[in-house]
Amino acid sequence: MHTEQFSYHRAESVEHAVELLETSDDARILAGGQGLIPLMKKRELTPDALVDITQIDELRGIERTDDTIRIGGLSTHREIADSALLKETAPVIPRTVAHITGGQQVHNVATIGGNIARAHPGYDYEGALLSAGSQIVVSGPAGKQRVPVSEFVRGPCSTTLAETQLVTSIEIPVLSGDRRGGYAKKKEPASGNAIVGVATDLLFDDDQSTLVKSARIAVNGLQGCAVRLDATENKLEGKQLTPDRLEAAAGDASSSLDSSAVLDNKKASAEYRLCLLEPQVQKSIRQAVGERTLYSQT
Ligand SMILES: Cc1cc2nc3c(=O)[nH]c(=O)nc-3n(C[C@H](O)[C@H](O)[C@H](O)COP(=O)(O)OP(=O)(O)OC[C@H]3O[C@@H](n4cnc5c(N)ncnc54)[C@H](O)[C@@H]3O)c2cc1C
C-alpha cells in the first residue's frame, strides 16, 4: 500500500527541525520510521510533511555527565542493548530492550525517541524508563524542557509533546551502589507488543548484599500508561530480600492498582492481564536479583 503524498525535509540541527515543524500545518518527525511508515501506508496517519531528524548528530550518543546518563533521542535499540555504560549504571534499560521484537531490522534503526514519543501502551521502554526515574528532554520554540516520564505520557498514544517539539534525549539519574535491572514480558503473539511487561530497578549496597536500598517496579501494557507498583516496592524497600518476601511482594502487585483502569480489548481481557501480573513481577525481580543467594526467613 502507498502513502498519501507528503513533502520531505531533512533537518540539519534541532533548531532547524523546530523551524520546519513550525512552518507546516501537519508535519511529523521521521526517526527510524518503524512505527510511522506502516501507519502512513495504512493511511491511519496522513501528514503533509515529514521532518527527517536522522542526520542531527547532537541527538546521538549515550554518555555520562556527573550523576546523569544521557541517551540521545536517536539512539537505536541496538546501541542501547549493547551499551556497556547502561549495563553498568541503569541495567533495566538494556535488559528491557532485549525483549523488543522485530529482529535486527527494527533494532538497527528504531530509536528510543520514536518509541517513547509514540507512547503505545504495548511498547516496552516506558515502564523501564519509569522504573529508572527518567526525564524526557524535549526541545521546541521555547527552548529545552525536562519532563518526568510519568508526566510525559498522558495516555495510550498520547504525550505532552506539542506539534512543534521533539524528544532530544532521555536522562537517567546515576545511583551509588549495586544497581540491578530485570524485565519480564508476556507478548501479544501477533505484534510482539507487551500484554504485560514488568520492569524492575533494584539498588543494593554491593553485589553480595541482599538488603534492598531502593525498589522501583513499573508495569507497561496493563493500563493506558505505565504505572509503578507501589505495594510491591514497599514490601521490598529497606528489607532483606528472602524468597518468601519476594513472593509476598509479587503477590501484592495488583493491590495498589486501579483495576478499573486495566486495559480490556481484543488483544487481551483485563482479567487475563491481571492474572499475568504476579508471575511476571516475580520473574522480573528474580532477573534483577541475579545470582544472589536468598536465604529463607526464620
Ligand atoms: C515488526 C515490529 C515489531 C516491534 N516490536 C516492538 C516491541 O516488541 N516493543 C516495542 O517497544 N516496540 C516495538 N516496535 C516499535 C519500535 O521498537 C520503534 O520504537 C517504533 O517503531 C518507533 O521508533 P522509530 O524510531 O521507528 O520512530 P518513527 O517510526 O520514526 O516515529 C514514531 C512516532 O514518533 C514520532 N517521533 C519519532 N522520533 C521522535 C522524536 N525524537 N521526537 C518526537 N517525536 C518523534 C514520529 O513522528 C512518529 O509519530 C516494533 C516495530 C516493528 C516494526
Image: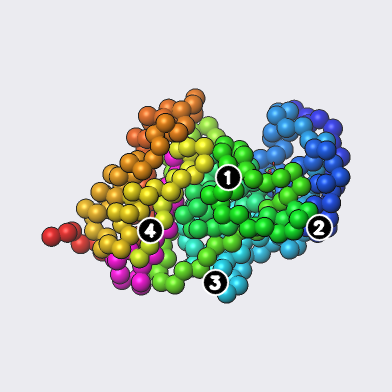
**Residues under labels 1 and 4: Cα distance?**
22 Å
> For mark 3, what is the residue?
67
From the image, tell me which residue sits under label 1: 153
Magenta stretch in the rendered image: 195-212
**Residue at 47% in and 61% down:** 91
Sequence-wise first label, 1 or 2 = 2
Horizontal relation, residue 205 to residue 79: left or right: left
Q: CA distance from mark 2 to mark 4?
A: 38 Å
First in sequence: mark 1 vs mark 3: 3
Q: Is 211 colored magenta in this rendering?
A: yes
Residue of label 2: 15
Observer able to see residue 104 = no
Q: Are marks 1 and 4 in contact (CB under 8 Å)?
A: no
Q: Quadrant of ligand 1?
A: top right
| Whole-number angstrom distance, CA of label 3 to CA of label 4 | 19 Å
Q: Residues within 10 Å of mark 3 (few under 14, many from 20)?
A: few
Which residue is tagged 4? 215
Residue lying farthest to the front in this orientation: 142
Three-letter amino acid code at disc 1? Val
Chain-order first, disc 3 or disc 4? 3
